[in-house]
Every structure is written in structure tokens, then in C-alpha cells.
């Protein structure tokens, strides 16, 4: 599983919990689409990322600021937050080479990109965290 896949999994993307919040497509169009040889449209489940992370933060022994720190976000999810792991994630997500050489720039890019990717996958990330 990819590093970003682990983040998605920890937040309930694509699992049973996410499937429970998916609005199924009406059987009529899906059946018609299948009969026509076209793949049916499947709704993306909306995952309440903020609520999940706030709940984790509230019960975590250490005070973590996941809204601004990729290290804290990874710690909160119980994932390895070492520089090597962050570089692996940055490489996976396509971090520009000029940012990879400066850990502070890489971390800022990585935090923003992870939140954007969560939003693209159905996470409810507030606009102020995506700027």
C-alpha cells in the first residue's frame, strides 16, 4: 500500500465506514449504463476528515497541530513521521525537486498537498486549510 493509501485508510476512505456513507446510484441508470457497456457512475463517499482528526487530537496524549504540521498530522494518524517517511510521501505525491532539498519547504508543500488530495478523494477539508 502506498504511503498516501495508508493515510486514506486511517481516515476511513474506501473502507466499510466510507461505504456506509456513500449514496448509491439509482438502480435504473446504473443498470441501463451497464447494459449499454458504460461503467456506472459511483458517488464518492464524503469523509468528515476534520471531525475524525479533531477527535483523534482530543484523545491524543501529545498536543498536536495537524492543521499546520505534516509531522503532527502523521503522528496523529499513528504513521511514521520521520524525515525519510516524509520524503517517501513527498516523492509519491510529486513534490518539486527544489523543495525536496529543504525540509521546511518540503513539509509545507506536503501538508498542503495531502490536504488537497484528501479533498479530491471526498474529504471535507475547509477552504482555509487548502490555501
Image: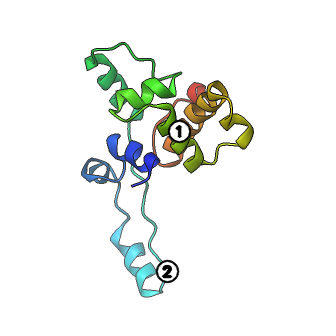
Q: Which residue lies furthest to the right in this view?
A: 98
Report the residue at 45% width, 79% height from top.
33
Disc 1 crowd, CA 10 A, few/some/many (<14, 14-19, 20+):
many
In three-dimensional space, the C-alpha distance between marks 1 and 2, rounded to whole angstroms, equals 32 Å
The percent position of residue 62, horizontal first and vertical second, equals: 33, 14
**Residue 124 as seen in the image, left or right of residue 6:** right
Report the residue at 68% width, 34% height from top.
101
Q: Quick one: quadrant of the C terminus?
A: top right
Which label sits on residue 86?
Answer: none
- Find residue 29 and report its image quarter: bottom left
Front residue of 50/87: it is 87
Q: Nearer the viewer, mark 1 or mark 2?
A: 1
Front residue of 74/102: it is 102
The percent position of residue 126, horizontal first and vertical second, equals: 53, 29
Reading the chain from its start, which is encountered first: label 1 or label 2?
Answer: 2
Report the residue at 53% width, 21% height from top.
68
Report the residue at 57% width, 42% height from top.
90
Q: Quick one: quadrant of the N terminus?
A: bottom left
Q: Name the residue under label 1.
A: 114
Disc 2 crowd, CA 10 A, few/some/many (<14, 14-19, 20+):
few
Front residue of 50/109: it is 109
Confirm or deny contact between disc 1 and disc 2 (CB under 8 A): no
Which label sits on residue 38?
Answer: 2
Amino acid at each position: 500500500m502506498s504511503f498516501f493509501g495508508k493515510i486514506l485508510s486511517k481516515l476511513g476512505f474506501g473502507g466499510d465506514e466510507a461505504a456506509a456513507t456513500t449514496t448509491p446510484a439509482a438502480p435504473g441508470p446504473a443498470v441501463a449504463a451497464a447494459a449499454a457497456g458504460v461503467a456506472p457512475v459511483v458517488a464518492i463517499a464524503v469523509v468528515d476528515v476534520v471531525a475524525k482528526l479533531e477527535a483523534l487530537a482530543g484523545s491524543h496524549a501529545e498536543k498536536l497541530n495537524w492543521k499546520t504540521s505534516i509531522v503532527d498530522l502523521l503522528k496523529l494518524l499513528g504513521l511514521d513521521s520521520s524525515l525519510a517517511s516524509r520524503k517517501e510521501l513527498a516523492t509519491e505525491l510529486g513534490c518539486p525537486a527544489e523543495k525536496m532539498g529543504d525540509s521546511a519547504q518540503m513539509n509545507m508543500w506536503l501538508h498542503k498537498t495531502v490536504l488537497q488530495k484528501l479533498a479530491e478523494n471526498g474529504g471535507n477539508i475547509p477552504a482555509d486549510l487548502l490555501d
